[in-house]
Image (cartoon, grey):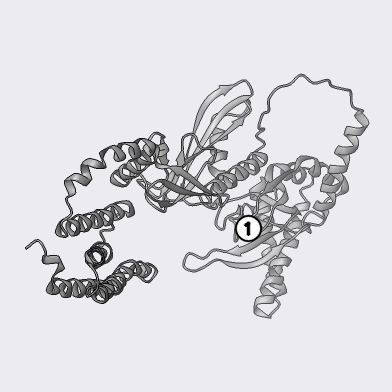
Amino acid sequence: MDKVLFTHEAAIVGVILAMVSIVASLALLPANERSRIRVPALLLLAYFIFGGLNSLLAPYMQTGPVRTASVFFLWAAAAHATTMALLDGLLARKLNLPIPRIFRDILQVSVYFVVLLVTARTAGVELSSLLAGSALITAVIGLSLQDTLGNVFAGLSIQAQRPFEVGDFVQLADSVEPLGKVIEINWRATKLLTNDSMEIIVPNGVLAKTSIRNLSKPHNWVRRSIRVHAAYEFSPAHVRETLLKAIVEAPGVRTDMTASVIIDEFDPDGASYRLRYFADVDEHIHAKDSVVRERIWYAFRRAGIDIPYAQRDVHVYPQQVDDKETVRATHVARRQRDLRRVDILDVLSDEALHDLAEKISTRRYAAGERILKQGDEGDQLFIVEHGEVAVGLEPENGPPVELARLGAGKFFGEMSLMTGARRTASVRATRECAVLVVGKSDFQETLHRAPELAEKISAILATRQAQLATTHTGMANPANVTSQTTIILGKIREFFGLRS
């Protein structure tokens, strides 16, 4: 009965079981894991080699060890192939119940150990004497491999609790790297891939004692916080509105979740605000923070909000008043030249144009930021100082349509400035740009001092509309220009409160 593994019938059963399991694993395992079949296949080949040696040497000498080795290789191949087919093929692939690698490896080693014990016991080896004699050796090995064994058991704990999995993005409490993607969890350590494409190997024992932030659990999105200072002279409501507008349509910011702004504290340098927004977790999470900070800078510049800096003792040397006046005059002259390019403003006198150039402001926009939205109310004219913008339509049912691109010296929004008409198109910066902004309040005093300018401007606008209509229809209608001039003139007078 003890020699049942060494019988011819048992050998046939073992070979059939091993071959069937290998074929089943070949069919069930994915293509990238089929190379693992080589291990049971090599064990089965070793069985045939040692079995052949046993048959050749049996007539001439005792071949007990050779025969025992062949039996071990046979049943090790059968057990390995069967375990692999059941765990990795049936449970993991078909039933979608993946087994962690470390548990799979432990199970395979346990299978080898059981086969070895059974084979040795069947061959007549007294195992009690071997176990008693190896106790001291086991103790010595255990002490010398204390750290390694600690990492192994920590790996078992990680696989059992599953605080993170392969593919998750994690942060370690004491790591200099802010973010890493888990690419492998093995017996001894866990491998992380940083944003700099560097591989970090962290021993499992260290992970078991370190706080870990898993950005991929329980959701694949997180709330990010950006801290920014603003000077005290700006109201919290104004700063909060500016911050929330800054991240509208910013790449990477989730639009289906509400962003918020809180006041962190009052510092000596200014009020500290924290902008909190939501973003999907991926390797670009810190780049998204950078984009949000960039949008905040541009939004603060447009809103006139200063970002305070640390106070220092400085030595101030008097600057020549003439230098300041020269710089200011240069800016005003450049603005006046840009204003003169706009046909509806070309009717102004040099004095009126100079006064207007001193009042208007400059706004900066980042690439991709929206300047105007189709359908919004407005009372401002924009002149591209440098950079480029794209003008387009955004239909409710259909993709956006780009109509034109405007570079330095071009303008848009003249009908809204003069009549308060809603925006008929959307405008977005294609790259970083600066635009001069002429508002109703800037232009109102000019029109009240010279009301006759309204008639000239209305005629220019009506002529332009007629030219556009002729381009589309191919037919000119002079009478329509006259009637349209009257309509536009009435809207200008009503919008600016001018008497007829």
Q: Residue furthest front?
A: 60
Is residue 199 shown above or below 374? above
Q: Is residue 455 left or right of residue 172?
A: right
Q: Nearer the viewer, residue 322 or 20?
A: 20
Residue 264 in view, yes or no: yes
Q: Quadrant of residue 95?
A: bottom left
What residue is at 72 percent from the left and 44 percent from the top?
444
Is residue 408 shown above or below 194? below
Q: Percent x, y for residue 252? A: 51, 52
Is residue 182 shown above or below 472? above
Residue annotated with mark 1: 427
Q: Is residue 323 left or right of residue 90?
A: right
Q: Percent x, y for residue 124? A: 15, 57
How many marks on residues? 1
Q: Percent x, y for residue 162? A: 32, 46
Q: Which of 434 and 466 is in front in this view?
A: 434
Q: Looking at the figure, which quarter contains the N terminus?
A: bottom left
Q: In which quarter of the image is residue 116?
A: bottom left
Q: Nearer the viewer, residue 257 or 144?
A: 144
Mark 1 residue type: Val
Residue 257 in view, yes or no: no
What residue is at 46 percent from the left and 49 percent from the top?
191
Q: Percent x, y for residue 251? A: 54, 53
Crowd around label 1: few <14 · some 14–19 · many ≥20 (10 Å): many
Q: Is mark 1 on a helix, strand or loop?
A: strand
Q: In this view, does 179 lie to the left or right of 145?
A: right
